[in-house]
Image: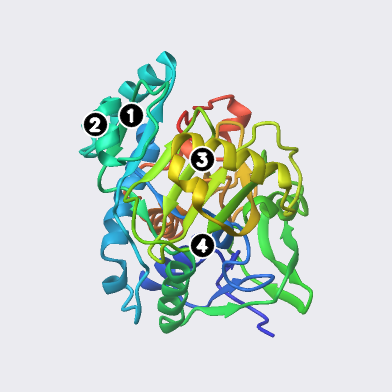
Amino acid sequence: MKKTADYVVIGGGVIGCSIAYHLAQKGAKNIALIEKKYLTSGATGRCGAGVRMQFGTETNCLLAKHSVELFENLEEELSYDGSIEFKQGGYLLLAYTEKMVEQFHKNLGIQHQLGIPSSWVTPEEAKEIVPYLNTQGLLGATFCPKDGHCNPFKTTDAYAKAAQKLGVEIMTYTEVTELLAQEGRIKGVRTREGIIETPVVILCAGSYSRDLAATIGIELPITPERHQILVTEPVEKMQEPMVMSFYHGLYCQQVPHGGFVMGLGDPNEPKEYNYNGSWQFLHEMAAKATFILPPLANLRVVRQWAGLYDLTPDRQQILGSVPGCEGFHLAAGFSGHGFMIAPMTGKLMAEHILGEPTSLPIQMFDFSRFERGDLFIEPSVV
């Protein structure tokens, strides 16, 4: 059991592995990444794994744009002996109300200023992109051909192996039960196997970050919310883009092996740790998906599962240091879009932790914004 470390990263999802890699890549030594189960056992391994640049805030658009550029070359950068299966088939975002049309045009204005190749398409043009799309009630859509989908397990594995080559020690099946702080600074972490002394902790444990921060008296405004997903049997290629409807709260993507992965958000979902699947989800998902994409009615469901969003009040992540506790850093509260911005998030967090100028501004994601009431809502989330 390791007794000391210069840096302890808590959470073995894609965010934690990306941060650990980038720290090591910048020359940091004696890094330990601790995961209570196996890598990707939390939100990363349960996500829909879409990657899109079509957001409604400049900051998320930038994070996603830079992350897409990193995804495009990630196998080479990490010297990964395999494929992360990054497929850029685009995202088709559907608009069913005048309010959505107005919001989408605002989003396009932001995206175009940042060089994101998104565009407005008519219902007829949307049907050209997805020929079997039901356009009933559809007012239009936006489409970005460089959005896509990636394998979350292989992406995390790529970061983890690259981090290990640089000397990072990855400790799986090791649960952190308590953070240790004294006189306003981090001193270490307590695990079920013993204490690891460290002056720096980076907490990126998704919804469970809230519980660990509470052990040193810090209240994080993060709540867990169940989101359910299913995958169908594999079939011949029939759909390139991810189809997403904020109106219906769903997304649907055909992944490289041929199956359709689709998920559904429920704003009335209780804010609790719940990984159980439900027949209600299957019923609602089937009704909504087959309305939008009728041929999917012929597909058989292989399995369903649930994961947790780590929601913040403004649906924006918390990145950076925690005031009043030196050496304590957060990368949590991603509210369902952590995977798609993980490459750039890891780089930015490493820069911040090592005291370097960050490649993009992150001060708007600081922990103190909630106390200040300085929130800015991300409008484009399911």
SS assignment at label 2: helix
Q: Which residue is mark 2?
A: 125
x, y (%) of residue 248?
Answer: 53, 31
Distance (Cα) linking label 4 and label 3: 15 Å
Distance (Cα) linking label 4 and label 1: 28 Å
SS assignment at label 3: helix
Depth check: 257 or 147 in front?
257
Q: Residue at (32%, 59%) from the top-left corner?
A: 87
Q: Which residue is mark 3?
A: 289
x, y (%) of residue 185?
Answer: 66, 56
For marks 3 and 1, give the one nearer the viewer: 3
Q: Which residue is mark 4?
A: 233
x, y (%) of residue 11?
Answer: 60, 64
Determine whether label 4 and label 1 are within 8 Å by CB: no
Distance (Cα) linking label 4 and label 2: 28 Å
Instruction: First in sequence, mark 4 or 1: give its number.
Output: 1
x, y (%) of residue 299?
Answer: 51, 54
Instruction: First in sequence, mark 1 or 2: give its number.
Output: 2
Q: Is residue 299 visible?
A: yes
For marks 4 and 2, give the one nearer the viewer: 4
Depth check: 57 or 285 in front?
285
Q: Which residue is mark 1?
A: 141
